[in-house]
Amino acid sequence: MCLVNHTSRLYVDHLHNPRLGTEAIPALSWEDRYKYLGCPTGSYRTPANVLNALRDGLLRDTGIVFSSQLAEWQKLDAFRKFLFPRLCFVLKVVFPGAIWCKKLDTALRTTIKRGPHLPPRACTKYFYLSQALGGLGIPSVEDESHVARAAQVYKFLADTRDPRITDVALDQLKETVAKRARHLDRTTPEGLMLFINSTSLPGEGRRPPEPLTWNKRKLLFQALQEEIHIRHLRDLKRTTDQGRAFDSVSLHPDSTFFIYTGAFLTFPQYRFIHRARLNLLPVCTVQALCHRPITNTQCRTCGRAPETLAHVLNHCHYNLGMARDRHNAILERIVKAVPEFMGTKMKEQPLPGTGDNRPDLTIISPCGRKVMLVEVSCPFEGSPTALEDAAAHKVTKYEPLRRQLLQNYSEVTIHPFIVGSLGSWFPGNDRVLSALRIGYKYAALMRRLCVVSAIARSQTIWYQAICKSHHRPAATHDNQPSATTPPAAPGDQPTTTKSPTNQPTTTMPPAAPGGPPMGNSDQAVLA
């Protein structure tokens, strides 16, 4: 079927019936449209009812998927692979407008939050941030619309041979360079290419892309997508309470490998990690920020410090034993992965003549001349340089031991192995795995196993702390636990009594005074 469509009303009014051989070709008027692959296409603006039908269909199908019995990660993957792609072609043809895209993003985001059980106040940038940088990787309708429009304009300019169009585009580019980059020479092609490549205007946290040429379309679109994700990451880090962990999470893509697969994680652990990285778990300090009636923000377990997520997972005296188990779980994986030809492996044992220093893992080469000290640490991702600081602390701590061992060995090296409490993988660990002669394929698997071990143990700490403290009297400074052997807190065991029907019933002690109540959304994380 052949149609003729023009963008000029006057030309359409005076257009005679064109013919292709003996067949007449129908001419579209200014208001007419035709469907191309199911999308209304024409020079006139797409009517609102057509756009509303597309929006309602997508929202209906999204609601069906997220209310189904699929797993949380399956819902996210289904939306990303099957539902949203059918909108991508529409955005390339229709251009619905920014307001329509923002409203659709808001409606979709409200439905998608039910997947990982996130509360309404979760930062929107977390949804649109790419998986490699620590987010859910849900595409934004508004961003995709901008990229699609840029792609169409680029295709129009790159494929045209009309000198008038190229002259207009070149004049507009020179005008833009004159306004935004006055230090560049807009009269030379070199100055214009410097502006296009953005090598002279690097933004915050922005890597200058490779030089672009007119035949590298894929590179151009990848640069646009990368810039959008970097902007989302920068905005997420600027949030006061929800973006602190993403400086560490975004360092390596294996920190979020489980987003669409849920590999090696249980349902409670998968729900826990999303809230934990956004600092949305119901600790007392977070509840106070939400303007809830919290009379006491001290830790419900020890009562010594404000109850923050970092305190619960890493610093509370009652939880130090479980934190040690998290450390040992990662250490056991390293010990099992080191091949036998590396030499003698000593786990948490002091070397002769070194005093009480007990590195986590000491490897002595078969020749007896080289020693490797491997130290494991699980810091909390509460600062931009948390992982780097933990690695530097381990090196500084064991530097005197290294100097002492150099008197008997020719080479002594210290290898800090850092995995965050919330599953952040430190890129320096890859050098440790390479030094330990661990195979490339198993090293890729080991990265994920270590990340999962940290998440699983942290979820166990959180579960035990919340469940026990919810049924434990308020802690006082008179009955504080010791840092080495934390005693059982009073009120941990339920009290069994007899009911009037001579049936045993179980009653729990009251919750800690001033502690936050447990809502349905909070109980979903513990389920």
Image (cartoon, helix red, strand yellow):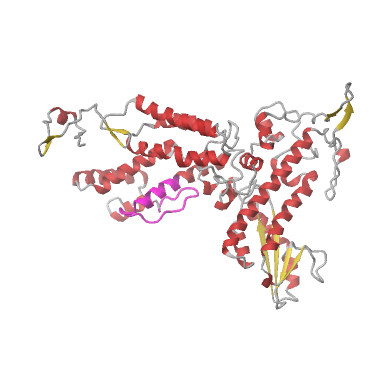
Q: Is residue 138 visible?
A: no
Q: Which residues are magenta?
A: 199-227
Please identify the quarter of the rendering in which residue 500 is found.
top right
Q: On the rendered structure, is 282 left or right of 156?
A: right
Q: Give the camera-side residue of 200 and 465.
A: 465
Magenta region, main secondary structure: loop
The number of callouts visible is: 0
Q: Give the camera-side residue of 508 and 216.
A: 508
Instruction: Estimate the x, y position of residue 36 in percent, counting from the top left.
Output: 29, 36
Instruction: Estimate the x, y position of residue 439 in percent, counting from the top left.
Output: 59, 65
Task: Name the outermost residue toward the top.
Answer: 500
Q: Is 438 located above or below residue 300 in the figure?
A: below
Q: Classify the position of the C terminus by image quarter.
A: top right
Q: Residue at x 59, y 45 (%)?
A: 262
Q: Is 512 located above or below residue 189 in the figure?
A: above
Instruction: Estimate the x, y position of residue 422 in percent, counting from the top left.
Output: 65, 47
Q: On the rendered structure, is 190 left or right of 494?
A: left
Q: On the rendered structure, is 327 left or right of 127?
A: right
Q: Residue at x 31, y 54 (%)?
A: 215
Q: Is residue 349 visible?
A: yes
> Per the image, is 114 magenta?
no
Q: Residue at x 78, y 36 (%)?
A: 469
Q: Classify the position of the N terminus by image quarter.
A: top left
Please identify the quarter of the rendering in which residue 274 is found.
top right
Q: Give the camera-side residue of 348 and 226.
A: 348
Instruction: Estimate the x, y position of residue 247 in percent, counting from the top left.
Output: 58, 48
Q: Is 102 located above or below residue 406 in the figure?
A: above
Q: Is 252 located above or below residue 19 in the figure?
A: below
Q: On the rendered structure, is 67 left or right of 395?
A: left
